[in-house]
Image (spheres, rainbow, N blue to C red):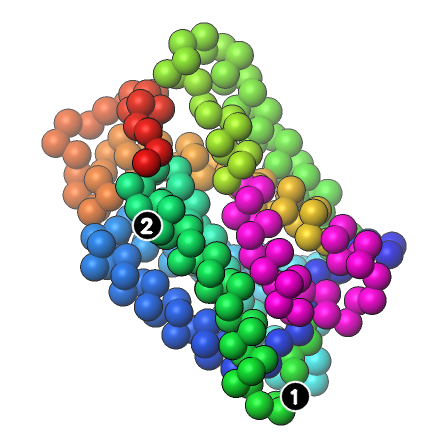
Amino acid sequence: MSEIIAQRQFSPMYIWLDIAFLIFLAILLIRQKKYATLGVGIVAGILYMLVDYGLFHLVFHSRSICEGYSLFWVLLWMSMSYGFTNFVWIWLWISKDKNLKEWSLLILLWWFCCPLLAKTFGGTTELITIQRTTGAYHGYMAVILFVGYLGVILWNMQHQKKEQKIPLGWILAIGILVQFGWECALLLGGIRSATILSWGDKILTMVINSLLETNLGMPYVFALYLWYCSHFTEQGKKREKKISWIEALEENNKRKYN
């Protein structure tokens, strides 16, 4: 391959099943009073749409879809789906939610099961094939990735106290594994790179996307999380006593994963 091609092929049933899950996940977050997490997921979905349709399609002309389907509406669903679930999961992971294992299993289980359900119950409807080339913008994404992690590296070099260091290993793990989780599920479900015959090309797409695409935003998301926590609670209320960004970092570092 001359460049990485991110391609998906799925039935319309896959979209409707996933929309039902997104509604269920949003209701569950509300019931658990995870209002900030819900808000971050919605904002991330909108941001994904602005990037995917606004930049990838309108600016770089890298998006294409098979005849008979609307690129706008399919991208809107895709952006809200993975933008929402990715950043809900990231926020829960960064905040070290007490039910992180349960949330993680729920999301991963759905990503794995949804393609299988759609294949079984999707009927004989013509499949939707959508893809994007990446050569026009992966360099820009690499700049964002490098600058973000360079900032984390320099911060940690200047702060010797353990509680004031940004957990670089955890940020990398979250950024890589969240993307890898759904890339792997899409590949196993026959959705990712369905018409690409070479397994080497399929694996290359999964690996590059996992290292780059969600991971590039992790240093900035972590900084945003600390800023939010220094001012507000998970329920969206102002903290009784505002704390500094570095105090929020120390507070987060002291919190343990269950």
Does the residue at mark 2 contact the one at mark 1 (Cβ under 8 Å)? no
Q: Secondary structure at mark 2?
A: helix
Q: Position of residue 60 (x, y in %)?
A: 71, 59
Which quadrant: the N terminus? bottom right
Residue 37 circle label: 2
Q: Earlier in the sequence, mark 2 or mark 1?
A: 2
Name the residue type under label 1.
Glu
Crowding at dot 2, Cα within 10 Å, few <14 / some 14-19 / many 20+, comes out as: many
Name the residue type under label 2.
Thr
Pick the residue in front: 156 or 64: 156
Q: Secondary structure at mark 1?
A: loop
For residue 137: magenta? Answer: no
Crowding at dot 1, Cα within 10 Å, few <14 / some 14-19 / many 20+, comes out as: few
For residue 193: magenta? Answer: yes
As displayed, is residue 19 above or below residue 152?
below
Does the rendering let one see residue 91?
Answer: no
Q: Position of residue 164 (x, y in %)?
A: 39, 16
Q: Position of residue 7 (x, y in %)?
A: 70, 66
In the displayed structure image, the side of residue 112 where residue 188 appears, left or right:
right
The residue range painted magenta reads 175-204
Does the rendering let one see residue 116?
Answer: yes
Farthest residue to the bottom: give it: 124
Residue position marked by numbered label 1 in the rendering: 126
Q: Main secondary structure of the magenta part?
A: helix
Tell me where residue 198 sits by quadrant.
bottom right
Pick the residue in front: 97 or 70: 97
Q: Position of residue 201 (x, y in %)?
A: 80, 56
